[in-house]
Image (cartoon, rainbow, N blue to C red):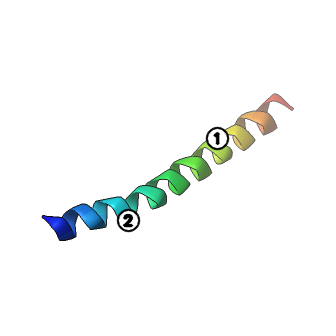
Amino acid sequence: LTGAAKTMIDLIPLFYVIALLLAVIYWAIGTAKTK
């Protein structure tokens, strides 16, 4: 359980970065469509 918990904690920053990148991509697409 400890190893699994540590793995989840290590993956949290990765998921955060992926979500941030997706948000930037969607924002860029939306900005390009309005122009």
Residue 13 screen position, x and y as percent: 47, 58
Mark 1 residue type: Tyr
Q: Residues within 10 Å of mark 1 (few under 14, many from 20)?
A: few
Task: Name the image quarter holding the N terminus.
Answer: bottom left
Classify residue 33 as left or right of residue 13: right
Looking at the rendered structure, the number of numbered marks drawn on it comes to 2
Q: Which residue is mark 2?
A: 10
Question: In the current view of this chain or complex, which residue is farthest to the bottom?
Answer: 3
Q: Residues within 10 Å of mark 2 (few under 14, many from 20)?
A: few
**Circles 2 and 1: CB atoms closer than 8 Å:** no
What residue lies at 59% left-to-right and 48% top-to-bottom?
Answer: 20
Q: Which residue is mark 1?
A: 26
Mark closer to the observer (2, 1): 2
Q: CA distance from mark 2 to mark 1?
A: 26 Å
Residue 19 screen position, x and y as percent: 52, 48
Residue 12 screen position, x and y as percent: 41, 56
Classify residue 17 as left or right of residue 29: left
What residue lies at 38% left-to-right and 65% top-to-bottom?
Answer: 10
Q: Secondary structure at mark 2?
A: helix
Mark 2 residue type: Asp
Question: In the current view of this chain or complex, which residue is farthest to the top?
Answer: 34
